[in-house]
Amino acid sequence: MFTLWKDEKDRKYIITIIVIMLCLKMLGAIFVNYYAYNGKTREGLIFRNSDIITQSKVSPTVLALGYHWDSIHYVNTSQMWEKHFKTAGQLRNAAYLYPLMIAGVSKVTGNPILSAVLLSNLFSIMAVLALYCLCRNFTSRFKSLAAALLLMTYPAFFASGLLDYSEPAYIFFAIISWYFFEKDRYALSALFCGFALCTRVSGIILLAVYVLVFILRVFKESNTNRRLVLPPAGILFYAIPVIFLLLQTLATKHFVLATGIRTESFNGFLPALKGHFTPVSMPFDQLQYFKDNTGQGLEMYMYIIPAFILGIYLRKIRPGLTVYICTALLAVICISSEEVFRAFPRHLLNAWPMFVALGDLLTNRWILATVCTFFFIGGLKLLDFYFTCCYI
């Protein structure tokens, strides 16, 4: 980004991105403020802790942004850890970097709820800027700006970046990891891959993508040179996220044994598939469920199928990103928990390279503006759903 900042035109685009994001966040905050002061934020309160609310002393708007549904678990975990696990049994996202960051920032602000909201919003801005910087490696300024605008207005990203959710931090780490991968700086790529994995368990997708990309490179180069071409030595750096995964798994095992909850899905050092920790199985289980719930299935796959098409389109830009999207989508269609199905649009953020493809396609400014407006209004609608019905 520092290199791009030196270029006057890129600097203008970067400033434009920041200004637009801040304006959208202000509009989102006004929307939530209206809901908070009119008694419409009544859902998702079950695990609120009175001590944390008393300690925080924040406005109803900040309380709404940072202490509903899954946001409560991030904040409570950052302050109570095992005590919260015993109360809520919330160990599905067995990744602890985000609560640790909330705890660290709270040392400065003295307020975990405010800290969580600040972190989520800051990382959402950084993630969009990271996407612009990544796109500038292989496409024009306008197409990079288009990709950034589409990501920032995509309903699930807009909402999770305004509320206290870990997705923005995860997406930032994932994009930065791929940025360094593109630069063949494997040590930094592996480090940020590890950070992504420790922010959300779905970060393991990124590790799988790198393994697949290296394997495909070996086959391609070996076929071209008619001899075995080994991958670069830098691949060894990806032992870093593997170590992070092991440490995180050990931490989860500790919490499970200490709290005595959800032990039925824990098998030694690794969680069992199709259990509480890893609600995934073969895609057939999901398809069987949607066979009996066709309406919900159509609603979910209206996101997945276009994303897959965008992934195929990416072959002409960056074949590695096609591997990324296909791997991420495979993970999404392997989700086996019915209660997680409604969060498909948010899980689809794992396939963030689709915005690179979409930005490359939407070269008409009016069409781009129309799609972004549609996305943004969808984001407000998602906030309404979040506060009046269910988690996102």
Image (cartoon, rainbow, N blue to C red):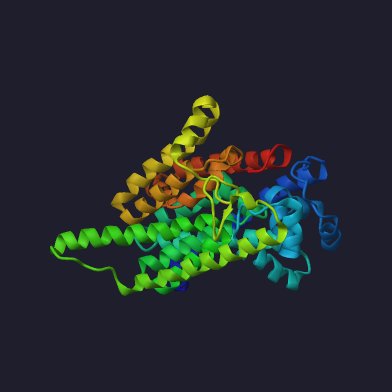
- Name the foreground residue: 262 vs 300: 262
Residue 184 visible at all: no
Specify whether 221 is left or right of 5.
Answer: left
- Name the foreground residue: 236 vs 255: 255
Residue 306 visible at all: yes
Quadrant of the rendered image containing residue 104: bottom right
Q: How many marks?
A: 0
* Quarter of the image with the C terminus in it: top right
Please say if 235 is above or below 268: below
Q: Measuring from the top left, give residue 262's x and y in whole percent.
A: 65, 51
- Name the foreground residue: 296 vs 160: 296
Please say if 62 is above or below 301: below
Q: Residue at x 47, y 66 (%)?
A: 242
Specify whether 370 is left or right of 254.
Answer: left
Q: Measuring from the top left, give residue 274's x and y in whole percent.
A: 53, 45
Q: Measuring from the top left, give residue 156's x and y in whole percent.
A: 57, 46
- Name the foreground residue: 209 vs 40: 209
Q: Residue at x 49, y 69 (%)?
A: 243
Quadrant of the rendered image containing residue 155: top right
Q: Measuring from the top left, give residue 312's x and y in whole percent.
A: 33, 45
Specify whether 343 is left or right of 383.
Answer: left
Please say if 306 is above or below 326: above
